[in-house]
Image (cartoon, grey):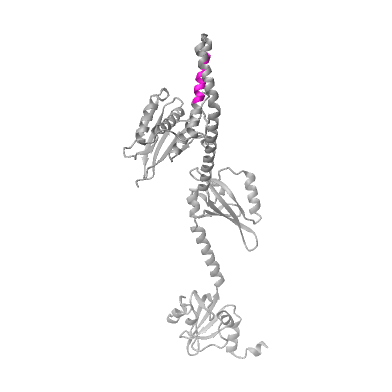
Amino acid sequence: MLTAIMDSPATVAHFLIDIIPDMCFVLSEKGDVLSYNKKAQELLSLPSDIPQDLSFRSLLAEDSPRPVEAMLKSARTASDGAEVQFRSSDGKLIFGYLNIRKMAGPDREYLYVVAQDISEVKRKELDLLRFSNVVHYTVNPIQITDAKGRMIYVNPAFERTSGYTREELLGLNPNKISSGKHGKAFWQEVWKKIGKGEVWTGEIENRRKDGEPMYTHLLISPIIDNDGKVVGYLGSHRDISQQKELERQLMHSQKMESLGTLAAGIAHEVGNPLASISSIVQVITRTSSDDFTKEKLKLVDSQVRRITKIIRDLVDFSRPSNYNVQMTDVVKMLSEAIDIVKIAKKAKDITFKSTLPTDIPIVSLVPDQLSQVFINILLNAVDAMHGKKGTITSIVFSDDKYITIVVRDTGSGIPEENLDKIFEPFFTTKKVGEGTGMGLWVSYGIVKSFGGDITVHSSPGKGTTFAVTLPVPSKE
């Protein structure tokens, strides 16, 4: 039967191009379509009868390359392949990869064009391009690892957030940036879940290259191939470091507010009994002639005065000051505080350096309270030297919004676990009798009442830096 069908060379040729899985066209030397196969008819929605004067050019999209026209004008007999875009009669765009051959006929030349449908390949390429652009340019830090957890890609946002370059990260395990806060059991549970192809989300704490904490909300999504096998993992981070810092400040503020309320109650409950004790001590001292008794009463009186001072500090912190607000020269107040502290016996081996410009704005606040803040900070810096030689540097600078006062010492520094407690009442690392732990707490309350802020940065053995910021009055 096959022999009966193929009763002529034309029939044979037509049969052969029809069984080819790609689109096939026979073109005239002018580029008109003389024949096409069933695949071309199907994909481009062409009629079964070939229209007269149907040019190959009319089958292409307007912005498509036109390699057939180039071949018609060329002396070459074959093309190396080219991509084009077909536009079917129903408007559908089809990507094709052409191979073109010139064929000599009895009296003229023909072009034989085979067009492979690469639409699905182009769609995947486009999807991949879109995905890669989204991943590369998103503001969220992204990392991709292989199935063993080695990083094979990080986007620019991840580099900016972590402080590491991609060259420093690729090929390494993500624990390169681990803070160590999350233990082995935590990560075992994470790997157990994502290893089964499930998505894991949660908040984690990592460590930037400069040592600062990096808080992110992490989503780990397994990358699965066509066989259902996990071949990698995509980790999408959302930086919540600022949110965590605001939460910490809010919690600290709430804690300080609660402590202030507690302080007012303590001052009331303890103040009255202390006044009674003080009065009794004074009466007995005046009426007693025993030297031993007077000596012990003097000791009692000194301790009562010490407790009274603590109560006074509590009261100062827990209620608005009654001191007079005045236009104050911050630089002058700091300079005077330095002069007071440097004459202390403990400061005899300490070098005081200062950068105090004269163009710092005048601010409206309570001078005595600001002086108390500066003296407290400077005395703490002196104590941090433990009687050894060192340097205390004071710097003042300003911009349109804030005046910043920095006091930096070269003392022993503060352990990291104590930094969050440094402004809490009664917290001190000094020996019993050397400090009450009230100075920095009161200073914190004073600066906050001015609408400013006070922060501390320190590392053991590398000294401590206190920074006080005060708002500059509006010029309006």
Residue 188, image x, y percentages: 64, 48
Residue 370, image x, y percentages: 41, 34
Image quarter (top left, top right, bottom left or bottom right) of the N terminus: bottom right
Indicate left or right for 474 with 246 as reference: left
Residue 339, image x, y percentages: 36, 28
Q: Is residue 103 above or below residue 158?
A: below
Please tell me which residue is depicted at 62% across the width and 61% down the height of the picture. 225
Most common SS among magenta residues: helix
95 or 460, which is in the foreground? 460
Please tell me which residue is depicted at 50% across the width and 87% down the height of the picture. 105
Indicate left or right for 193 with 96 as reference: right
- Residue found at the very far left of the displayed protein: 358
91 or 155, which is in the foreground? 91
Is residue 71 found inside the magenta-colored segment of the image?
no
Q: Magenta segment, which residues?
A: 295-308
Q: Is residue 238 above or below residue 9?
A: above
Label tally? 0
Residue 360 occupies quadrant: top left
9 or 425, which is in the foreground? 425
- Residue found at the very far right of the displayed protein: 1
Please tell me which residue is depicted at 52% across the width and 88% down the height of the picture. 51
